[in-house]
Image (cartoon, helix red, strand yellow):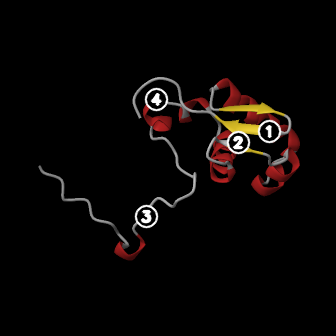
Amino acid sequence: MAQPPKEPVCRDRIRSIPRGFGWMDHRLVRDHYVEKCSSRALALYLFLIAVSDGEGVSWWSERSLATRLGMEADALRQARAELSAADLVAFEHPVWQVLSLKGGRQ
């Protein structure tokens, strides 16, 4: 049975990619990165993507990030460790960097 064509639910709200740097690589799902991280780590990753510059760099403090994400400091550090272990971010106080994904085609 053929599937019906995909149509947007809200035609007046079709997404366009803004001129910023807030994009997400679809390989996060395809290459199973999301399965390596908790929801807290993924929330931190999403936030860092949204606030980083064109090179993926951000200077948000751990305190500010924890407050914005509703996390305790220890939970934020754990989330950072998960993202680091998954090779998604690098952190050298006070600088965060969202890393390019290794391998594969984009």
The one of 27 and 51 positioned closer to us in this rendering: 51
Mark 3 against mark 4, which lies toward the viewer?
3
Secondary structure under the numbered disc 2 in the rendered image: strand
Tell me which label, 1 or 3, sits earlier in the chain: 3
Identify the residue position indicated by label 1 in the image: 95
The one of 4 and 53 positioned closer to us in this rendering: 53
In the image, residue 5 sits, relative to residue 47, either above or below, namely below
Mark 2 against mark 4, which lies toward the viewer?
2
In the image, residue 1 sits, relative to residue 84, either above or below, namely below
Residue 98 falls in which quadrant of the image?
A: top right
In the image, residue 13 sits, relative to residue 1, either above or below, namely below
Tell me which label, 1 or 4, sits earlier in the chain: 4
Tell me the amino acid under the disc marked 1. Answer: Val
Identify the residue position indicated by label 2 in the image: 57
Identify the residue position indicated by label 3 in the image: 15
Tell me the amino acid under the disc marked 3. Answer: Arg
Secondary structure under the numbered disc 3 in the rendered image: loop
Q: How far apart are marks 1 and 3 (CA)?
A: 30 Å
Tell me the amino acid under the disc marked 4. Answer: Asp
Q: Which residue is painted at 52% across and 25% down in the image?
A: 102
Q: Which residue is painted at 26% across and 59% down in the image?
A: 6
Tell me which label, 3 or 4, sits earlier in the chain: 3
**Marks 1 and 2 in Cβ contact (< 8 Å):** yes
Q: How far apart are marks 2 and 4 (CA)?
A: 23 Å
Identify the residue position indicated by label 4 in the image: 31
Tell me the amino acid under the disc marked 2. Answer: Val
Mark 2 residue crowding within 10 angstroms, few (<14) / some (14–19) / many (20+): some
Secondary structure under the numbered disc 4 in the rendered image: loop
Q: Distance between the residues labelled 3 and 4?
A: 24 Å
